[in-house]
Image (spheres, rainbow, N blue to C red):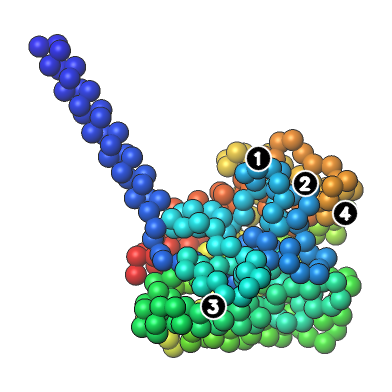
Amino acid sequence: MASTKTKLLNSCVLIIAILLILQFNMSRAQKVPAMYVLGDSLVDVGNNNYLETFFRANFLFNGIDFPGGKPTGRFNNGKNAADFIAENVGLPTPPPYLSDSNKNNVFLQGVSFASGGAGILNSTNDHPYNGTIYLSKQVGYFYEVQQRLIKKMGESAAKEHLTNSLFAIVIGSNDLFNYFSSKSKIHLTKSPQEYIDLMLSTLSNQLMQIQGLGGRKYLIVGIGPLGCTPSQRLQNSSENCYDEANNLTTIYNKALQSMLLKLKSNLKEHFNYSYFNVYDFLIDLIQNPTTYGFLEVKSACCGIGRLYAEGPCIPISTYCPNRSDHIFWDEVHPTEATTKLLVNTLFNNTKQYVTSMNLVNLLAL
């Protein structure tokens, strides 16, 4: 009798184990045919390696925790948001567009156009040795990929492919950094609201361009609390968050959400999106770090000077051994640990931070 009960118990355990494995595999199953990434250094996976630019990360100690321990052009210690989002939708990380030297790759599973230092505005960081792929140029590159898809698949199949693909948009931080930079003169010609209006009218036009080329599903990521990055904390002797930068970011994020609602109203079922309120989440993380397993909220892990934020992470910099408990990797970029937490929050459908449509439902459309 005991033997029969033991066999029954073992069978139940085996069935539960199989169900858990199937559930895990389903969660990792491919949810979209492709992912197209447009943005800045938060999601750049190596495009800037192919540019003559100051904005590069293909040197130590960047990538120290990436598989293989080598720098890849990602602006942190390991994987970035593009990697983690791709993992969650069951795709390999989209390769950098500029890695295709022959300009004939169809990129059937997606591609990244993101570029460190890039902005919504063409003028952002547009000066010698600071070359970037600004947003309108990224959209131009997407047009080239769309044409290759049509040539390979036919117009109808390419349209279906793009309709079901995910477009991840992570951009805007560099435009705001430029506005309140002590070296910038933009504030002399435009008020904060005028500048934000220009950013959003430009972004709206570029989203319309993507929509016209076939994009239907969008992940739009808001801008985080820029004033709480280590570089901006240096503005205060107290090393508290820099309010001017955070206030401008808050105004932008609110206006961005209004712009997206207007686009949705105009385009209806041809424009579906999830908006990720990364600002509020990071503020909560900074104010309650131990709740999430973090300890250091002010200082960068890798850099030089005060808060390790008076210079970038370069081979002569000092870097911390306890990278998983730091929110920031360098003067402005989050660590791999922070990034993974952000993307997990995005996919956990936390209504407090993901609005318009939760990402799981968006992917299932």
Q: Quick check: marks 4 and 2 in contact, CB under 8 Å?
A: no
Look at 48% across and 87% down and name the residue there: 212
Badge nearest the viewer, 1 or 2: 2
Give the mark nearest the N terminus, 1 or 2: 2
Where residue 292 sits: x, y (%)?
58, 42
Residue 224 visible in the picture: no
The residue that label 1 is drawn on is: 324
Query: In screen coordinates, is 167 left or right of 357?
Result: right
Residue 7 visible in the picture: yes
The residue that label 2 is drawn on is: 61
Q: Quick check: marks 3 and 1 in contact, CB under 8 Å?
A: no
Judging depth in this view, the residue of 73 and 286 nearest the camera is 73
Q: Amino acid at mark 4?
A: Glu
Badge nearest the viewer, 4 or 2: 2
Q: Amino acid at mark 3?
A: Val
Judged from the image, the secondary structure of the residue bearing numbered disc 3 is helix
Where residue 226 sits: x, y (%)?
72, 62
Query: In screen coordinates, is 351 left or right of 73?
Result: left
In the rendered view, tell whether residue 312 sits above or below residue 190: above
Badge nearest the viewer, 3 or 1: 3
The residue that label 4 is drawn on is: 310
Give the mark nearest the N terminus, 4 or 2: 2
Look at 49% across and 53% down and name the residue there: 87
Give the mark nearest the N terminus, 3 or 1: 3
The residue that label 3 is drawn on is: 145
